[in-house]
Image: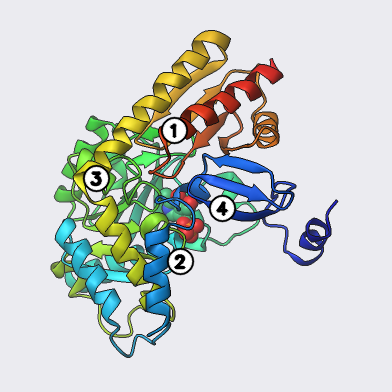
Amino acid sequence: MSNIIKEYSNYMVPFYAPEDFIVKKAMGSHVWDSSNKKYIDFTGGIAVTNLGHCNSSLIKVMNDQSKSLWHLSNLYINEPSVTLAKKLCNKTFADKVFFCNSGGESIEAAVKTARKFCSSTINKNKNEIISFSSSFHGRTMMGIALANSKHLIDGFYPLPKGIKNHPYNDEKKLEELFSDKTAAVILELVQWQSGITKANKKFISKIKKLSKKYNALVIIDEVQSGIGRTGTFFAYEQFNITPDILCFAKGIANGFPLGGILTSNKISDSMTPGSHGTTFGGGPIACSIGSKVVDIISKKSFLKNVGKKEMRFCKLLKKIDQKYKCFNEISSAGLWISIELDSSINVDDLIKISHRNGLMILKANPTTVRFSPSLIIENDLIDKGLGLFEKSIQSLL
Ligand SMILES: Cc1ncc(COP(=O)(O)O)c(C=O)c1O
Protein backbone atom coordinates (compact mmCIF):
# COMPACT_ATOMS: atom_id res chain seq x y z
CA MET A 1 0.00 0.00 0.00
CA SER A 2 1.38 3.42 -0.87
CA ASN A 3 2.42 5.76 1.92
CA ILE A 4 -0.24 8.31 1.03
CA ILE A 5 -3.02 5.72 1.26
CA LYS A 6 -1.73 4.63 4.71
CA GLU A 7 -1.46 8.24 5.80
CA TYR A 8 -4.95 8.99 4.46
CA SER A 9 -6.41 6.44 6.85
CA ASN A 10 -4.09 7.59 9.64
CA TYR A 11 -5.03 11.24 9.38
CA MET A 12 -8.47 11.62 7.78
CA VAL A 13 -11.83 11.19 9.51
CA PRO A 14 -13.25 8.14 7.71
CA PHE A 15 -16.31 9.81 6.20
CA TYR A 16 -15.27 8.48 2.77
CA ALA A 17 -14.03 5.18 1.35
CA PRO A 18 -11.85 6.34 -1.56
CA GLU A 19 -10.45 4.11 -4.30
CA ASP A 20 -6.99 2.67 -3.78
CA PHE A 21 -5.12 4.90 -6.21
CA ILE A 22 -3.92 8.49 -5.98
CA VAL A 23 -5.01 10.93 -8.67
CA LYS A 24 -2.11 13.17 -9.65
CA LYS A 25 -3.37 15.11 -12.62
CA ALA A 26 -6.39 15.60 -14.86
CA MET A 27 -7.08 17.30 -18.16
CA GLY A 28 -10.37 17.46 -20.07
CA SER A 29 -12.04 14.07 -19.52
CA HIS A 30 -8.81 12.25 -18.67
CA VAL A 31 -7.29 11.56 -15.25
CA TRP A 32 -3.85 10.14 -14.42
CA ASP A 33 -2.87 8.35 -11.22
CA SER A 34 0.48 8.41 -9.44
CA SER A 35 1.78 5.49 -11.53
CA ASN A 36 0.83 7.42 -14.66
CA LYS A 37 -2.11 5.14 -15.47
CA LYS A 38 -4.69 6.99 -17.56
CA TYR A 39 -8.44 6.88 -16.88
CA ILE A 40 -11.44 8.14 -18.83
CA ASP A 41 -13.54 10.16 -16.42
CA PHE A 42 -17.30 9.49 -16.55
CA THR A 43 -17.74 11.11 -13.11
CA GLY A 44 -16.81 14.77 -13.71
CA GLY A 45 -16.09 15.15 -9.98
CA ILE A 46 -19.77 14.17 -9.44
CA ALA A 47 -21.29 16.58 -11.96
CA VAL A 48 -18.91 19.43 -11.13
CA THR A 49 -16.19 19.75 -13.79
CA ASN A 50 -18.75 20.34 -16.55
CA LEU A 51 -16.15 22.03 -18.76
CA GLY A 52 -13.54 19.35 -18.15
CA HIS A 53 -10.55 19.28 -15.84
CA CYS A 54 -8.05 22.17 -15.99
CA ASN A 55 -10.02 23.97 -18.70
CA SER A 56 -7.58 26.43 -20.28
CA SER A 57 -10.01 29.34 -20.61
CA LEU A 58 -11.02 28.98 -16.95
CA ILE A 59 -7.37 28.75 -15.87
CA LYS A 60 -6.74 32.06 -17.62
CA VAL A 61 -9.68 33.74 -15.86
CA MET A 62 -8.57 32.33 -12.50
CA ASN A 63 -4.94 33.40 -12.98
CA ASP A 64 -5.91 36.90 -14.11
CA GLN A 65 -8.26 37.40 -11.16
CA SER A 66 -5.75 35.99 -8.68
CA LYS A 67 -3.36 38.84 -9.52
CA SER A 68 -5.80 41.55 -8.49
CA LEU A 69 -8.12 40.33 -5.70
CA TRP A 70 -8.48 36.93 -3.96
CA HIS A 71 -10.75 37.62 -1.06
CA LEU A 72 -12.80 40.43 0.31
CA SER A 73 -15.30 40.34 3.14
CA ASN A 74 -18.94 40.88 2.27
CA LEU A 75 -18.63 44.28 3.95
CA TYR A 76 -17.29 45.45 0.58
CA ILE A 77 -18.47 44.92 -2.98
CA ASN A 78 -16.37 42.80 -5.32
CA GLU A 79 -17.11 43.38 -8.99
CA PRO A 80 -16.96 39.77 -10.26
CA SER A 81 -19.81 38.78 -7.91
CA VAL A 82 -22.06 41.54 -9.28
CA THR A 83 -21.18 40.62 -12.87
CA LEU A 84 -22.06 36.96 -12.24
CA ALA A 85 -25.26 37.83 -10.36
CA LYS A 86 -26.41 40.02 -13.27
CA LYS A 87 -25.68 37.25 -15.79
CA LEU A 88 -27.60 34.67 -13.78
CA CYS A 89 -30.60 37.02 -13.41
CA ASN A 90 -30.58 37.84 -17.12
CA LYS A 91 -30.61 34.16 -18.05
CA THR A 92 -33.24 32.94 -15.58
CA PHE A 93 -36.48 33.80 -13.76
CA ALA A 94 -34.50 35.50 -10.99
CA ASP A 95 -34.12 39.12 -9.90
CA LYS A 96 -31.65 38.48 -7.07
CA VAL A 97 -28.80 36.13 -6.17
CA PHE A 98 -27.14 35.10 -2.92
CA PHE A 99 -23.75 33.38 -3.18
CA CYS A 100 -22.35 30.76 -0.83
CA ASN A 101 -19.79 27.97 -1.26
CA SER A 102 -21.61 24.66 -1.64
CA GLY A 103 -24.86 22.89 -2.34
CA GLY A 104 -25.56 22.22 1.33
CA GLU A 105 -25.22 25.91 2.11
CA SER A 106 -27.52 26.81 -0.77
CA ILE A 107 -30.23 24.57 0.73
CA GLU A 108 -29.73 26.21 4.11
CA ALA A 109 -30.04 29.66 2.52
CA ALA A 110 -33.17 28.64 0.59
CA VAL A 111 -34.97 27.27 3.65
CA LYS A 112 -34.01 30.29 5.76
CA THR A 113 -35.14 32.67 3.02
CA ALA A 114 -38.46 30.86 2.59
CA ARG A 115 -39.13 30.82 6.33
CA LYS A 116 -38.17 34.46 6.79
CA PHE A 117 -40.33 35.56 3.87
CA CYS A 118 -43.39 33.56 4.96
CA SER A 119 -43.12 34.34 8.67
CA SER A 120 -42.51 38.04 8.17
CA THR A 121 -44.95 38.74 5.35
CA ILE A 122 -47.77 36.16 5.68
CA ASN A 123 -48.07 34.63 9.15
CA LYS A 124 -45.48 34.08 11.84
CA ASN A 125 -46.24 30.35 12.17
CA LYS A 126 -45.84 29.69 8.46
CA ASN A 127 -42.61 27.69 8.61
CA GLU A 128 -43.24 24.07 7.54
CA ILE A 129 -41.31 22.59 4.64
CA ILE A 130 -42.56 19.69 2.50
CA SER A 131 -39.86 17.45 1.01
CA PHE A 132 -39.84 14.15 -0.88
CA SER A 133 -38.57 10.60 -0.57
CA SER A 134 -35.34 9.53 -2.35
CA SER A 135 -34.24 13.15 -2.44
CA PHE A 136 -30.74 14.36 -1.68
CA HIS A 137 -30.18 17.84 -0.30
CA GLY A 138 -26.68 17.52 1.17
CA ARG A 139 -25.28 16.49 4.53
CA THR A 140 -26.06 19.45 6.77
CA MET A 141 -28.59 18.83 9.54
CA MET A 142 -31.25 20.55 7.41
CA GLY A 143 -30.22 18.58 4.30
CA ILE A 144 -30.51 15.20 5.99
CA ALA A 145 -33.75 16.16 7.74
CA LEU A 146 -35.26 17.09 4.36
CA ALA A 147 -34.14 13.84 2.71
CA ASN A 148 -35.36 11.82 5.69
CA SER A 149 -33.50 8.65 4.60
CA LYS A 150 -32.39 6.19 7.25
CA HIS A 151 -28.85 5.91 5.86
CA LEU A 152 -28.41 9.69 6.13
CA ILE A 153 -30.03 10.41 9.48
CA ASP A 154 -29.14 7.43 11.71
CA GLY A 155 -27.01 8.65 14.61
CA PHE A 156 -27.70 12.34 14.06
CA TYR A 157 -30.84 13.04 16.07
CA PRO A 158 -32.37 15.42 17.03
CA LEU A 159 -33.14 16.74 13.55
CA PRO A 160 -34.46 20.21 12.68
CA LYS A 161 -38.22 20.39 13.04
CA GLY A 162 -41.05 21.52 10.78
CA ILE A 163 -40.41 19.10 7.90
CA LYS A 164 -42.95 16.77 6.30
CA ASN A 165 -41.83 14.13 3.81
CA HIS A 166 -43.98 12.60 1.05
CA PRO A 167 -43.33 9.93 -1.65
CA TYR A 168 -41.74 11.45 -4.78
CA ASN A 169 -43.83 11.53 -7.94
CA ASP A 170 -46.95 10.65 -5.98
CA GLU A 171 -49.55 13.38 -6.12
CA LYS A 172 -52.15 11.39 -4.22
CA LYS A 173 -52.70 12.54 -0.63
CA LEU A 174 -50.12 15.30 -1.12
CA GLU A 175 -52.71 17.87 -0.11
CA GLU A 176 -52.94 16.26 3.35
CA LEU A 177 -49.47 17.65 4.10
CA PHE A 178 -50.35 21.22 3.15
CA SER A 179 -51.86 23.80 5.49
CA ASP A 180 -51.61 27.53 6.19
CA LYS A 181 -48.38 26.63 8.05
CA THR A 182 -46.66 25.41 4.86
CA ALA A 183 -43.84 27.80 3.95
CA ALA A 184 -42.35 25.86 1.05
CA VAL A 185 -42.09 22.66 -0.94
CA ILE A 186 -38.55 21.60 -1.84
CA LEU A 187 -37.82 19.18 -4.67
CA GLU A 188 -35.32 18.05 -7.27
CA LEU A 189 -36.87 17.92 -10.74
CA VAL A 190 -34.45 15.13 -11.54
CA GLN A 191 -33.47 12.84 -8.67
CA TRP A 192 -30.42 10.58 -8.80
CA GLN A 193 -30.48 8.48 -5.63
CA SER A 194 -32.79 5.83 -7.04
CA GLY A 195 -31.35 6.17 -10.54
CA ILE A 196 -32.06 9.17 -12.79
CA THR A 197 -35.76 9.88 -12.15
CA LYS A 198 -37.66 12.85 -13.56
CA ALA A 199 -40.59 14.50 -11.83
CA ASN A 200 -43.75 13.57 -13.73
CA LYS A 201 -46.26 16.05 -15.13
CA LYS A 202 -49.13 15.24 -12.74
CA PHE A 203 -46.85 15.57 -9.73
CA ILE A 204 -45.56 18.95 -10.89
CA SER A 205 -48.96 20.34 -11.69
CA LYS A 206 -50.23 19.23 -8.27
CA ILE A 207 -47.29 20.92 -6.55
CA LYS A 208 -47.97 24.12 -8.50
CA LYS A 209 -51.68 24.01 -7.68
CA LEU A 210 -51.23 23.31 -3.97
CA SER A 211 -48.43 25.85 -3.53
CA LYS A 212 -50.69 28.49 -5.02
CA LYS A 213 -53.69 27.45 -2.94
CA TYR A 214 -51.75 27.47 0.35
CA ASN A 215 -49.51 30.43 -0.51
CA ALA A 216 -46.36 28.30 -0.20
CA LEU A 217 -43.08 28.78 -2.07
CA VAL A 218 -41.51 26.29 -4.46
CA ILE A 219 -37.80 25.66 -3.85
CA ILE A 220 -36.08 23.73 -6.63
CA ASP A 221 -32.79 22.06 -5.78
CA GLU A 222 -30.68 22.28 -8.94
CA VAL A 223 -27.37 21.70 -7.19
CA GLN A 224 -26.69 18.71 -9.44
CA SER A 225 -29.18 19.20 -12.30
CA GLY A 226 -28.14 22.80 -13.02
CA ILE A 227 -25.44 24.41 -15.18
CA GLY A 228 -26.21 22.49 -18.36
CA ARG A 229 -26.21 19.01 -16.90
CA THR A 230 -29.65 18.06 -18.24
CA GLY A 231 -29.34 19.86 -21.60
CA THR A 232 -30.82 23.22 -20.56
CA PHE A 233 -29.00 25.74 -18.38
CA PHE A 234 -31.33 24.81 -15.51
CA ALA A 235 -33.59 21.76 -15.56
CA TYR A 236 -36.71 23.77 -14.58
CA GLU A 237 -36.78 25.17 -18.14
CA GLN A 238 -37.96 21.71 -19.29
CA PHE A 239 -40.57 21.07 -16.58
CA ASN A 240 -43.22 23.76 -16.93
CA ILE A 241 -42.55 25.13 -13.46
CA THR A 242 -40.81 28.29 -12.26
CA PRO A 243 -39.24 28.17 -8.82
CA ASP A 244 -39.59 30.88 -6.20
CA ILE A 245 -36.12 29.93 -4.99
CA LEU A 246 -33.55 27.86 -6.90
CA CYS A 247 -30.45 26.28 -5.33
CA PHE A 248 -27.31 25.87 -7.42
CA ALA A 249 -23.66 24.85 -6.80
CA LYS A 250 -21.45 22.08 -8.21
CA GLY A 251 -20.79 23.06 -11.88
CA ILE A 252 -21.16 26.82 -11.51
CA ALA A 253 -17.39 27.41 -11.09
CA ASN A 254 -16.25 24.05 -12.53
CA GLY A 255 -14.78 22.82 -9.25
CA PHE A 256 -13.88 26.08 -7.55
CA PRO A 257 -16.23 26.21 -4.51
CA LEU A 258 -19.31 28.31 -5.29
CA GLY A 259 -23.03 27.89 -4.77
CA GLY A 260 -26.04 30.06 -4.20
CA ILE A 261 -29.72 30.76 -4.53
CA LEU A 262 -31.72 32.61 -7.14
CA THR A 263 -34.95 34.30 -6.18
CA SER A 264 -37.36 37.18 -6.87
CA ASN A 265 -37.31 40.78 -5.63
CA LYS A 266 -40.49 40.13 -3.67
CA ILE A 267 -38.93 37.30 -1.67
CA SER A 268 -35.48 38.79 -1.25
CA ASP A 269 -37.02 42.01 0.10
CA SER A 270 -37.78 40.17 3.36
CA MET A 271 -34.09 39.40 3.96
CA THR A 272 -32.24 42.11 5.85
CA PRO A 273 -28.51 42.69 6.46
CA GLY A 274 -27.38 40.18 9.08
CA SER A 275 -30.26 37.73 8.54
CA HIS A 276 -27.88 35.42 6.65
CA GLY A 277 -24.30 35.46 5.40
CA THR A 278 -21.00 33.68 4.79
CA THR A 279 -17.30 34.55 4.90
CA PHE A 280 -16.20 33.03 1.62
CA GLY A 281 -19.41 33.01 -0.44
CA GLY A 282 -19.24 34.95 -3.70
CA GLY A 283 -15.49 35.48 -3.61
CA PRO A 284 -13.91 37.23 -6.60
CA ILE A 285 -11.99 34.24 -7.99
CA ALA A 286 -14.96 31.85 -7.77
CA CYS A 287 -17.30 34.42 -9.34
CA SER A 288 -14.89 35.29 -12.19
CA ILE A 289 -14.70 31.61 -13.07
CA GLY A 290 -18.49 31.32 -12.67
CA SER A 291 -19.02 34.16 -15.16
CA LYS A 292 -16.95 32.41 -17.79
CA VAL A 293 -18.75 29.10 -17.12
CA VAL A 294 -22.14 30.81 -17.61
CA ASP A 295 -20.93 32.45 -20.86
CA ILE A 296 -19.87 29.09 -22.29
CA ILE A 297 -22.58 26.76 -21.03
CA SER A 298 -25.60 28.99 -21.62
CA LYS A 299 -24.99 29.09 -25.39
CA LYS A 300 -27.75 27.27 -27.31
CA SER A 301 -25.23 25.42 -29.48
CA PHE A 302 -23.41 24.15 -26.35
CA LEU A 303 -26.61 22.90 -24.75
CA LYS A 304 -27.76 21.24 -27.97
CA ASN A 305 -24.55 19.22 -27.98
CA VAL A 306 -25.30 17.92 -24.48
CA GLY A 307 -28.46 16.33 -25.90
CA LYS A 308 -26.54 14.84 -28.83
CA LYS A 309 -23.96 13.29 -26.52
CA GLU A 310 -26.74 11.93 -24.30
CA MET A 311 -28.20 10.16 -27.35
CA ARG A 312 -24.80 8.70 -28.21
CA PHE A 313 -24.40 7.32 -24.66
CA CYS A 314 -27.90 5.83 -24.64
CA LYS A 315 -27.60 4.25 -28.08
CA LEU A 316 -24.32 2.55 -27.18
CA LEU A 317 -25.62 1.46 -23.77
CA LYS A 318 -28.65 -0.14 -25.42
CA LYS A 319 -26.29 -2.07 -27.70
CA ILE A 320 -24.36 -3.34 -24.66
CA ASP A 321 -27.64 -4.39 -23.06
CA GLN A 322 -28.76 -6.21 -26.21
CA LYS A 323 -25.54 -8.22 -26.07
CA TYR A 324 -25.39 -9.04 -22.35
CA LYS A 325 -29.00 -8.52 -21.19
CA CYS A 326 -27.96 -7.50 -17.70
CA PHE A 327 -29.52 -4.00 -17.40
CA ASN A 328 -32.91 -3.49 -15.80
CA GLU A 329 -33.11 0.13 -16.88
CA ILE A 330 -31.12 2.85 -18.62
CA SER A 331 -32.29 6.37 -17.60
CA SER A 332 -30.91 9.74 -18.57
CA ALA A 333 -31.43 13.48 -18.30
CA GLY A 334 -28.80 15.10 -20.49
CA LEU A 335 -25.33 13.89 -19.56
CA TRP A 336 -26.60 12.40 -16.35
CA ILE A 337 -27.10 8.72 -16.97
CA SER A 338 -27.93 5.79 -14.72
CA ILE A 339 -27.92 2.08 -15.39
CA GLU A 340 -29.79 -0.24 -13.07
CA LEU A 341 -28.20 -3.67 -13.19
CA ASP A 342 -29.88 -7.00 -12.69
CA SER A 343 -28.71 -9.39 -9.97
CA SER A 344 -26.01 -10.94 -12.18
CA ILE A 345 -23.76 -7.92 -11.61
CA ASN A 346 -22.58 -6.52 -8.30
CA VAL A 347 -22.30 -2.73 -8.51
CA ASP A 348 -19.25 -2.44 -6.25
CA ASP A 349 -17.41 -5.09 -8.28
CA LEU A 350 -18.33 -3.31 -11.51
CA ILE A 351 -16.96 -0.01 -10.23
CA LYS A 352 -13.72 -1.68 -9.03
CA ILE A 353 -13.17 -3.50 -12.34
CA SER A 354 -14.00 -0.37 -14.35
CA HIS A 355 -11.33 1.51 -12.43
CA ARG A 356 -8.90 -1.32 -13.05
CA ASN A 357 -9.75 -1.07 -16.76
CA GLY A 358 -9.17 2.70 -16.75
CA LEU A 359 -12.72 4.04 -16.45
CA MET A 360 -14.08 6.16 -13.59
CA ILE A 361 -17.79 5.67 -12.85
CA LEU A 362 -20.10 6.34 -9.89
CA LYS A 363 -22.55 4.44 -7.74
CA ALA A 364 -26.10 5.77 -7.41
CA ASN A 365 -27.39 3.03 -5.08
CA PRO A 366 -26.67 -0.68 -4.41
CA THR A 367 -28.08 -1.77 -7.80
CA THR A 368 -27.35 1.26 -9.97
CA VAL A 369 -24.29 2.93 -11.49
CA ARG A 370 -24.24 6.52 -12.68
CA PHE A 371 -22.29 8.62 -15.17
CA SER A 372 -21.93 12.41 -15.02
CA PRO A 373 -19.07 13.14 -17.41
CA SER A 374 -17.91 16.57 -18.41
CA LEU A 375 -20.35 18.19 -20.84
CA ILE A 376 -17.56 18.58 -23.38
CA ILE A 377 -16.47 14.95 -23.42
CA GLU A 378 -15.34 14.05 -26.94
CA ASN A 379 -17.36 11.51 -28.92
CA ASP A 380 -14.40 9.16 -29.27
CA LEU A 381 -13.95 9.17 -25.47
CA ILE A 382 -17.62 8.31 -25.00
CA ASP A 383 -17.10 5.35 -27.35
CA LYS A 384 -13.81 4.30 -25.74
CA GLY A 385 -15.18 4.69 -22.21
CA LEU A 386 -18.24 2.60 -23.01
CA GLY A 387 -15.91 0.03 -24.58
CA LEU A 388 -14.16 -0.19 -21.19
CA PHE A 389 -17.54 -0.37 -19.46
CA GLU A 390 -18.53 -3.29 -21.71
CA LYS A 391 -15.21 -5.02 -21.03
CA SER A 392 -15.83 -4.64 -17.29
CA ILE A 393 -19.35 -6.07 -17.56
CA GLN A 394 -18.16 -8.95 -19.72
CA SER A 395 -15.53 -9.92 -17.16
CA LEU A 396 -18.17 -10.14 -14.43
CA LEU A 397 -20.61 -12.41 -16.26
C1 LIG B 1 -29.28 17.63 -5.39
C2 LIG B 1 -28.20 17.98 -4.40
N1 LIG B 1 -28.44 18.90 -3.46
C3 LIG B 1 -27.51 19.25 -2.56
C4 LIG B 1 -26.27 18.66 -2.56
C5 LIG B 1 -25.23 19.06 -1.55
O1 LIG B 1 -24.18 19.73 -2.16
P1 LIG B 1 -22.75 19.87 -1.43
O2 LIG B 1 -22.15 18.51 -1.40
O3 LIG B 1 -22.00 20.84 -2.30
O4 LIG B 1 -23.02 20.41 -0.07
C6 LIG B 1 -25.96 17.69 -3.52
C7 LIG B 1 -24.66 17.03 -3.54
O5 LIG B 1 -24.45 16.02 -4.15
C8 LIG B 1 -26.96 17.34 -4.48
O6 LIG B 1 -26.74 16.42 -5.40
Which mark is nearer the camera, 1 or 4? 4
Taking the spot 32% from the left edge, 38% from the top edge, the residue there is 306
Q: Residue at x 35, y 58 (%)?
A: 248
Dot 4 or dot 2, earlier in sequence: 4
In percent of width and height, residue 180 lies at 22, 56
Q: Position of residue 275 (x, y in %)?
A: 32, 80
Dot 1 amino acid type: Ile
Residue 40 visible in the picture: yes
Q: Residue furthest bottom?
A: 75
Which amino acid lies under the numbered mark 4 shown in the image of this protein?
A: Ala
Which disc number belongs to residue 337?
1
The reply to whether discs 3 and 4 touch (Cβ–Cβ < 8 Å) is: no
Q: Nearer the viewer, residue 12 or 360?
A: 360
- Residue at which label 2 appears: 257
| In this rendering, the label closer to the viewer, 3 or 4 | 4
Q: Which mark, residue 236?
A: 3
Q: Which residue is mark 4?
A: 26
Q: Amino acid at mark 3?
A: Tyr
Q: Residues within 10 Å of mark 3 (few under 14, many from 20)?
A: many
Of callouts 3 and 4, the N-terminal one: 4
SS for dot 3: helix
Pointer 4 local density, CA inside 10 Å: few below 14, some 14–19, many at least 20: some
Q: CA distance from mark 1 to mark 2?
A: 24 Å
| Quadrant of residue 358 within the rendered picture | top right
